[in-house]
Amino acid sequence: MMEKVRGISPDTQFIFISDKGTIHTAVDAMRKGAFDYLAKPLDEAQLMESIGKALDYQALVAEDHRIKQRLRRR
């Protein structure tokens, strides 16, 4: 699923949520490209923090692309 979405939108960030909160599951999700991993039951504050960090990261990636495009034009 993540691979399909990344093929369309490479900068999309994924937060993996699972009720099987094992280290193996978390490591596997991160290896596959998840931005973060959260185990159920969800803590609302933790989810909001993770979403905020993912959005901040996505904004930085977008700014990086804009800067690189400006540099290429020069």
Image (spheres, grey):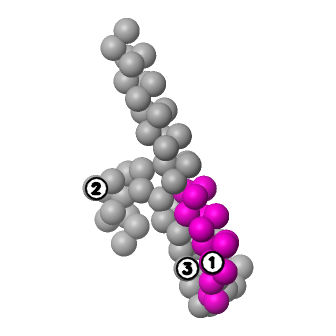
The percent position of residue 1, horizontal first and vertical second, equals: 36, 72
- Compare residues 42 and 24 and report the one nearer the observer: 42
Which amino acid is tagged 2?
A: Ile
The percent position of residue 51, horizontal first and vertical second, equals: 55, 63
Query: Magenta part of the protein: which range?
Result: 40-54
What residue is pinned by disc 3?
Answer: 17
The percent position of residue 42, horizontal first and vertical second, equals: 63, 83
| Dot 3 or dot 1, earlier in sequence | 3
64 is within the stretch colored magenta: no
Query: Extreme left residue here?
Result: 8
The answer to the question of whether label 1 and label 2 lie on touching residues, with beta carbons closer than 8 A, is no
Q: Secondary structure at mark 2?
A: helix
Residue that appears at 55% across and 79% down:
17
| Dot 1 or dot 2, earlier in sequence | 2
State the CA–CA distance, disc 1 to disc 2: 29 Å
What residue is pinned by disc 1?
Answer: 44
Q: Residues within 10 Å of mark 1 (few under 14, many from 20)?
A: few
The answer to the question of whether label 3 and label 1 lie on touching residues, with beta carbons closer than 8 A, is no
41 is within the stretch colored magenta: yes
Which amino acid is tagged 1?
A: Glu
Q: Nearer the viewer, mark 1 or mark 2?
A: 1
